[in-house]
Structure formats: structure tokens, C-alpha cells
Image (spheres, rainbow, N blue to C red):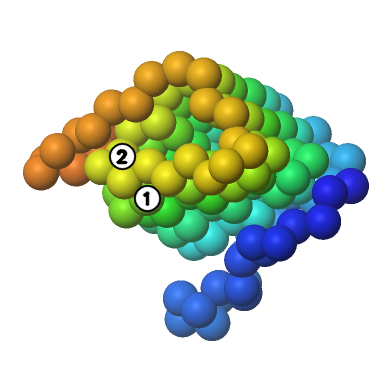
Amino acid sequence: MHASRHRPAPSTRGGAPWTLLGPGTLLRGDLVLSGDVMLYGRLEGAVFTDGEVWVGPDAVVEGGIHARRIEVEGTCRGRLEALECITLRSGALLHGEAACDVVQVDPGARFTGWRSAPGAGGPRVETYRAPRPGTA
């Protein structure tokens, strides 16, 4: 396992803890929540949150991430969409789209795909609608 130099501090949003997908865990499906997320395992689906998402060095996301802020040290394949910023740290791999006005790619990070800047209207994070109870 890689040592993370940029591991996020515990959430400061109202004292709420991070939601954690631990090492060795595989989750198939979408993760829809309010608050911050730390991914150490493998997610085959998407994350939809109003908080921050941190993808750890050995984590793999096969799908999208839609959040306020995204920081990647692991591997993502799909669309990353953030309201504030997307940061790819050294060792990160993104194959897909980075949709945000601010995208930071640190030395040693790899980005294959395209960047879109949503402009003044902001990204389309609101395009996801959770299914109504009883219709899923």
C-alpha cells in the first residue's frame, strides 16, 4: 500500500464523520449520500454527494464522481464532476473527463481524456435524481 502524503483531515462539516469504503472492499452500484467520502477499496458505480470525495492510493473507481471537491491519489475511470476543484495527486490515474473550472494535475499524476469547464453556470451535479421509493 502506498503512503499518502495528502490524506485529508477528518471532516469539519458539522463534526460529521467521513463515509469510508475500506481496503479490500468491492461495492457495485451507486453511492448516494450527503457528506464526505474516503475510498480505499474498489467502486464499480458512481458517487453522488454534496461533500468531498478522496480516492486513496490503492483505490479504483470505475464510474463517476459528482461532488463539491474531489482529490484523487488512486485510479478513476469515468467522469469526475466537481463544484469547486478536482486535484490529481502524484500517482493518480484518471481516464475520462474532468468537469470543473479548477483542475490541478500534480507532477507524477496521469490524465488521459478531456477537461470541460462548465463556466459560470457550474457543473451539472444536479442532473442525478435518486429513484422514488418503491420504483427502484
**Can residue 82 be seen by looking at this rendering?**
no
Q: Is residue 91 visible?
A: yes
Residue under numbered circle 1: 85
Q: Are marks 1 and 2 in contact (CB under 8 Å)?
A: yes
- As shown in the figure, which amino acid type bears the numbered disc 2? Cys
As drawn, is 122 to the left or to the right of 120? right
Residue 21 x/y as whole percent: 73, 49
Q: Nearer the viewer, residue 42 or 130?
A: 42
Query: Does 63 sit above or below residue 19?
Result: above
Q: Position of residue 40 (x, y in %)?
A: 76, 47
Whether residue 26 sits left or right of residue 132 in the image: it is right
Residue density around tag 1, few if under 14, some if 14–19, many if 20 or more, within 10 Å: some
Residue 63, percent from left and from top: 56, 25
Q: Secondary structure at mark 2?
A: loop
Question: Which quarter of the picture shows residue 9?
Answer: bottom right
Return the residue found at the far bottom: 15
Gap between marks 1 and 2, in whole Å?
6 Å
Q: Residue at x 75, y 57 (%)?
A: 4
Q: Residue at x 74, y 45 (%)?
A: 57
Residue at 84% x, 49% y: name it.
2
Label 2: how many residues lie within 10 Å, few (<14), some (14-19) or many (20+)? many
Element marked by disc 1: strand
Which residue is pictured at 65% across the width and 55% down the height?
38
The spot of residue 1 in percent (x, y) is 89, 47
Q: Is residue 40 above or below residue 36?
A: above
Identified by mark 1, the residue type is Cys
Among the two numbered marks 1 and 2 on one chain, the one whose residue lies closer to the N terminus: 1
Q: Is residue 47 above or below residue 35?
A: above
Which residue is tagged 2?
100
